[in-house]
Image (cartoon, rainbow, N blue to C red):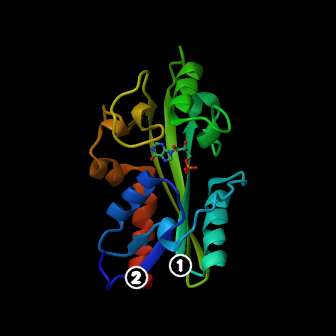
Amino acid sequence: MNSNLPEIVFATNNPHKLEEARAILAGMVNVLSLEQIGCHDDIPETAETLAGNALIKARWINSKYGVDCFADDTGLMVDALDGAPGVYSARFAGKHCSPADNIRLLLEKLNGVDNRSAKFSTVVALILDGREHLFEGSVSGHIAKDLKGAAGFGYDPVFVPENSDISFAEMKPEDKNSISHRGRAMAKLAEFISKNR
Ligand code: IMP
């Protein structure tokens, strides 16, 4: 932690996302976790768009704690499934399902399907000095036929980004961050913060 840098809360309970954000924003802002501000809320994600969900989470933290903060929401859009699971990616296989359940269902639905193209999209909602800003990042790729790699989280073992023959879960974290949906959205967030702080 560099005490000269501004502090900003990342409204997520996902330790992988926190780690990615800290790596991407290192040297620009100190990213605080919800735990560090004493928040243990399970923030509802009831919107039907990524931007809507990201805004719900950022507004929740900003209004309750009065701090600058950002939140993200991510979806995996699979062409052969008409864009599903999209905004419902976290609960694709059911309300309390695991990432492994989601991947199993995805591979089942794509069994025998040739068109495996897909896209990850992230929307980051930032509330800085009471003003809201949105940043989007996406990466195209395809869904592999089997799981590959052990790094990352979520759908990483089956997502192979374009111009690559390895999955996100086979990449070093810095390589994933340099091309990923969240990396791209956070690069825009970082640029905005550096110009406005
Ligand atoms: P959320 O943004 O946490 O709601 O994520 C929606 C779904 O996408 C969850 O199932 C996550 O595990 C998954 N997800 C989010 N970001 C990533 C990523 O960078 N790689 C793989 N899966 C992800």
Is the residue at mark 2 in contact range of ligand 1, meaning its CB lies under 8 Å from it?
no
Residue 119 location in percent, x, y?
50, 41
Q: Quadrant of the N terminus?
A: bottom left
Comes first in the chain, label 1 or label 2: 2
Which structural element holds mark 1? loop
Q: Which residue is mark 1?
A: 68
Which structural element holds mark 2? loop
**What amino acid does circle 1 point to?**
Asp
Residue 124 visible? The answer is no
User: How many marks do you count on the picture?
Assistant: 2
Q: Quadrant of the C terminus?
A: bottom left
Work out whether residue 149 or residue 181 is closer to the camera in this orientation and state it. 149
Vertically, is 160 above or below 123? Answer: above
Q: Are marks 1 and 2 in contact (CB under 8 Å)?
A: yes
Q: What's the residue at 35%, 38% (across, down)?
A: 169
Location of residue 98 by image quarter: top right
For marks 1 and 2, give the CA distance: 10 Å
Residue 181 location in percent, x, y?
45, 51
Vertically, is 5 above or below 86? Answer: below
Q: Is residue 183 left or right of residue 43?
A: left
Q: What's the residue at 53%, 78% (across, down)?
A: 68
**What amino acid does circle 2 point to?**
Pro
Residue 80 visible? The answer is yes
Q: Which residue is mark 2?
A: 6
